[in-house]
Image (cartoon, rainbow, N blue to C red):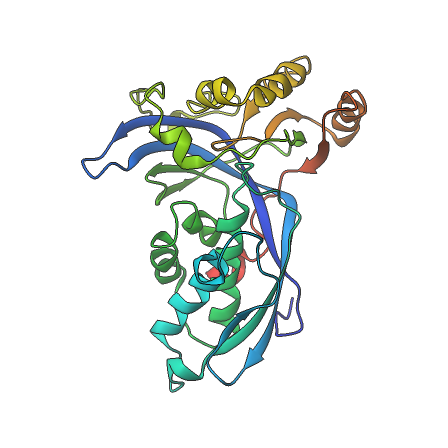
Amino acid sequence: MNWNWDSAWPAPAKLNLFLHVVGRRADGYHLLQTVFRFIDLADTLRFEPRDDGQIVLATPTPGVPDEQNLVVRAAEALKKVGAGGTAPSQLGATIHVEKRIPMGGGLGGGSSNAATTLIALNHLWGCGRSREELQEIGLALGADVPIFIHGRNCFAEGVGERFTDVAVPDDWYLLTMPDSHVPTPEIFRSPALRRDTPAIAPADWCPGWGHNDLEPVACALYPEVARHLGHLRKHGDARMTGSGACCFVAFENAAAAKAALDSLPASMRGVVVAGLPAHPLVTLSD
């Protein structure tokens, strides 16, 4: 595809197929192991060139000042590295974000938006930064941003910056969205959070293995998450993704996932999504 200023740039969501907290660094950052899986639920970003050096977010997020928005921060961070003979002060863009990924759901929407901003503007501005350089910029914005730049389903370690690509099934998922906004810091601060799950080697992971260490804490604080998981477990090994609140269960085909969706109580919101073989922009970050 010929990606340009007229393109609609996708920012897909992710699922954590498992999520273990295996330790904690001296600086307080938690050490994690997880498998990231991209799905076809996605936000869409559009970019308009500006020659005045301004980064303008045309679609502000309610309650989030523009200067704190990850999309704006990503664009400003890339501006600092410049582009060839173009001074950073001349690099500008107006950015439109069409949201479909719920906030506070553990689906990585904000991180994905930031990653797509870095990938897109690196291409549109002609910055010429490598995937590894973009990942370094992204890590300063948030632990999940680099995975979306990496662009492949993978086993991640550390604070989320070390990747080993893994094969995942061509599954479909019933994804439910509890009416709860779960703040990630609240979950990680909890004294009830287990932080000593034994680490494994990436080669020892297989689909269906593991659990989510954050899930018991989220369920205790937000009973609606526990209610959704209880219903989904009628269909299989349901799990919470990330720090919540969204929950999912896997199916081998779309028809089975759709049948499970149709069985949801009227009070539960859900959607059927497909797993992706890779991020749609993976070739642009190579």
Q: Position of residue 244 (x, y in %)?
A: 52, 31
Furthest-left residue in view?
Answer: 26
Q: Is residue 26 left or right of residue 191?
A: left
**In the depicted view, which residue is nearer to us: 253 or 101?**
101
Residue 228 higher or lower than 142, as above or below: above
Question: Which quadrant holds residue 276?
Answer: top right
Task: Report if residue 202 is visible in the image.
Answer: no
Residue at the farthest front position: 63
In-image side of 43 versus 126 (left or right): right
Residue 116's x, y, as percent? 53, 59
Task: Using the image as rendered, state which of residue 64 and residue 12 is in the foreground.
Answer: 64
Q: Is residue 37 left or right of residue 157?
A: right
Picture coordinates of residue 270, whole percent (x, y): 71, 31
Query: Going 31% across and 24% down the picture, which residue do you hit?
Result: 199
Q: Is residue 206 left or right of residue 137?
A: right
Relative to 6, does residue 247 appear above or below in the rendering?
above
Q: Residue at x 46, y 54 (%)?
A: 149
User: Residue visible at 64% across and 52% down?
Assistant: 99
Total marks shown come to: 0
Residue 1 seen from this side: yes
x and y, in percent, of residue 106 in the image: 52, 36
Vertical side of 168 occupied by 190: above or below: above
**Which quadrant of the figure contains the N terminus?**
bottom right
